[in-house]
Image: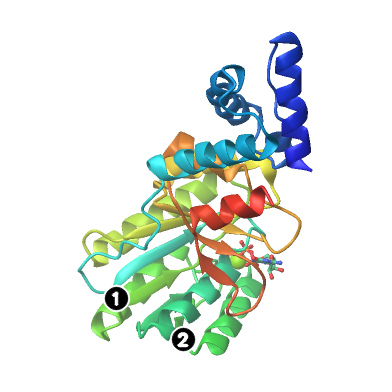
Amino acid sequence: MPILFLALSAHRIDRDQGTLFSPALLVSDFGPKITIKIVEGLREDILAGKLKSGSEIKDALKRSVLELLTEKGDKTELQLGFRKPAVIMIVGVNGGGKTTSLGKLAHKLKKEGVKVLMAAGDTFRAAATDQLVIWAERSGSEIVVAEVEKAKASSVLSQAVKRGKEQGFDVVLCDTSGRLHTNYSLMEELIACKKAVGKVVAGAPNEVLLVLDGTTGLNMLPQAREFNEVVGITGLILTKLDGSARGGCVVSVVHELGIPVKFVGVGEGLEDLQPFVAEAFIDAIFS
Ligand SMILES: Nc1nc2c(ncn2[C@@H]2O[C@H](COP(=O)(O)OP(=O)(O)O)[C@@H](O)[C@H]2O)c(=O)[nH]1
Ligand SMILES: [Mg+2]
């Protein structure tokens, strides 16, 4: 389907030398701004006759998207530093997949021999803690939960990092609350969480991973901007790619904010978190 669209686009140029538009990229949720940028880049080659067939155009398109993704987003590995424990905060809006991704990440790290401690930092809803406790059991991880009702998230995280330090854990994975990102108090809470863990281990958190729901489309960009301004995002987890969503809009996020995608979520099971591989992601978009 996308190839057909692109062939049509190229044909339009031949005919009227007019604007080249690419519904294929728009269909994949890239959004108009990045689509224009990519297509403008290819326009000259198409007009000069260097790219003729649909498949040549498709390959060139894939190369430009790859360039956008790798230019600023090539640090796809977790950067955990040398101090123990390394602290990873998982942030994002409600329902995006924070808790699930945290559980899957714990499983993945444990398989690599990493000693993982979870921190139930979503103290807003009791059910959030219960959900993380189940993931702790599934992944065989230890977990720190709030001792009192409505405890401050920052104090739970601080407690967890202290325990992590005392008991020789390698990584503390911190869940956080995800009420609307436009909610001022959530952002305040995240700032407090970040400060709290930094007080226990200098340089923590090592990673602040923003979970983006692959089905959100263009809303990803304002979400990412806002979280990044407030807490400084170091990496992205793009979830729910097992459905029909292709998550193309994340290219705009990587390009505009210079933040790499580190993992993709492809389901609700333990094994359903994969390292981000730009080439595979692009192949899926243009398949
Ligand atoms: N299909 C699918 N569902 C996911 C994925 N990640 C999370 N979910 C589901 O999305 C819903 C919200 O996830 P949750 O981790 O509770 O989101 P949170 O509010 O950000 O912590 C749950 O039903 C998860 O099972 C994914 O990669 N694929
Ligand atoms: Mg949650």
Q: Position of residue 233 (x, y in %)?
A: 42, 49
Q: Which residue is drawn at 47% across and 64% down?
A: 152
Name the quarter showing ligand 1: bottom right
Residue 227 shows in this picture: yes
Q: Residue at x 57, y 87 (%)?
A: 138
N-terminal of the pair, mark 1 or mark 2, is 2
Q: Is mark 2 on a helix, strand or loop?
A: loop
Local crowd size for mark 1, using a 10 Å CA cut-off: few (<14), some (14–19), many (≥20): some
Identify the image quadrant of residue 204: bottom left
CB within 8 Å, label 1 to label 2: no
Q: In which quarter of the image is the N terminus?
A: top right
Residue 150 shows in this picture: no
244 relative to 131, above or below: above
What's the residue type where badge 1 is placed? Lys
Q: Residue at x 53, y 50 (%)?
A: 186
Q: Mark 1 points at which residue?
A: 162
Residue 141: assigned label: 2
